[in-house]
Image (spheres, rainbow, N blue to C red):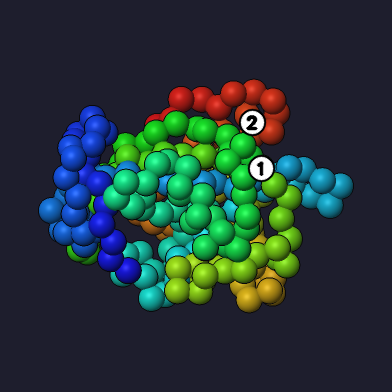
Amino acid sequence: MDEKIDILDSRGEKTGEVAWKSEVHRLGLWHRCFHCWIAAPETPSGGPYLFVQRRATEKETWPDRLDVTVGGHLGAGEETLDGLREVEEELGLKVAADELIPLGTRRAELEIPAGLDREFQEVFLLVRPLSVKDLRLQEEEVAAVVRLQLDGVEALHEEGEIPAEEWRGGEISPVSVRLTDFVPGEDGYLLWAARAARDVLAGRGPDALL
């Protein structure tokens, strides 16, 4: 769905201009996005875990690929925490602002079929135990959620493939995950997010964002 968003300069400052998202991507203009990674702490039954989303098959960019747990554009005039609506819309989870752990701002450029996606991503972490029954997925945006062992993310980069669980339609299925299943160029971001989640779960502050 197209929407109007604020245009930024190359330093991430608002220019005062507003444009449709489709035009922003076509022209490669800088804009802001909200990202939220979700991690679950270790319990007697397993973990810790990192969750990623499988993008819906109808998405114009990177359909069926794995991506950050929740992500979305910030509309014109919106503040960073207005992005919390994305968590409820995409996953059906209600989250309070004070539950989010800020991880920093990531500057990212990625070629897409529609042009060039240039984003300043405001990145947060939510630590919450989840079950498949907790989720109500927005089917036109999210096909499934995949639960990765946090240790497995490191192994993914070393071994190229790890076992995981895919949560889809209230059902759980075993799957194998490869780096090629993710949005292109995001493998370093995934590894950083896993390490940041581990640091937070251990009571340490995360390293500087990529």
First reached walking from the N terminus: tag 1 or tag 2: 1
Residue at x 37% of width, y 46% of height: 78
Residue at x 38% of width, y 76% of height: 58
Above or below — where is 170 with respect to 201?
below
Amino acid tagged 2: Val
Q: On residue 66, which mark appears?
A: none
Circle 1 SS class? strand
Point out residue 141 in the picture as x, y percentages from the top left corner: 45, 68
Name the residue that disc number 2 marks. Answer: 200
- Could you tell whether 176 is left or right of 49 in the image? left
Is any part of residue 35 visible from this angle?
A: no
- Please state, as top left, top right, bottom left or bottom right, where the C terminus lies in the image: top left
Residue at x 45% of width, y 31% of height: 104
The number of numbered discs placed on residues in the rendered structure image is: 2
Amino acid tagged 1: Val
Circle 2 SS class? helix
- Please state, as top left, top right, bottom left or bottom right, where the N terminus lies in the image: bottom left
Q: On residue 127, which mark appears?
A: 1
Above or below — where is 63 with respect to 189?
below
Point out residue 6 in the picture as x, y percentages from the top left corner: 25, 46
